[in-house]
Amino acid sequence: MFACSFQLRLLPPTLSDLPDLSGPSGALKLWDNPLSLPIQDQFRLGPEHLARYLAGDAYAAVYKRHHGGGSLGRAREGGGKAGGK
């Protein structure tokens, strides 16, 4: 058995695109991760709040700054959700 030291601090903005994130059958297991305080706050309010926060421009800017504008950041800049909305 081995211990994994990988922990999440930020979540990809595209996580908000998952249809089951805020649905009744959705399950998002985030415990034991040092998530940023804004993510923790939104998660406490409920999955719908978290999804809206992750999809917003303010979070996209935070994520882009942290990840240096990687491919997920560029996808968000190109018009939001995948599938052409």
Image (cartoon, helix red, strand yellow):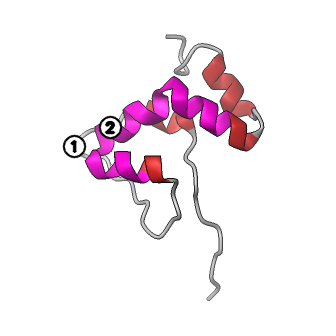
Q: Disc 2 marks which amino acid? A: His
Q: Is residue 49 above or below residue 56?
A: below
The residues colored magenta run: 40-64
Report, in whole angstroms, how far the alpha carbon at label 2 lies from the one at label 1.
14 Å
Quarter the N terminus occupies? bottom right
- Relative image position of residue 72 (x, y in whole percent): 67, 33
Residue farthest along the left direction in this orientation: 24
| Label 1: which secondary element | loop
Q: Which mark is residue 49?
A: 2
Tell me the residue at 47%/35% (across/down). 54
- Relative image position of residue 19 (x, y in whole percent): 37, 33
Q: Which residue is mark 1?
A: 24
Secondary structure character of the magenta stretch overall: helix
For residue 21, say whether it is visible: no
23 drawn magenta:
no
Q: Disc 1 marks which amino acid? A: Pro
In this view, the residue in front, 17 or 52, is 52
Tell me the residue at 27%/46% (across/down). 45
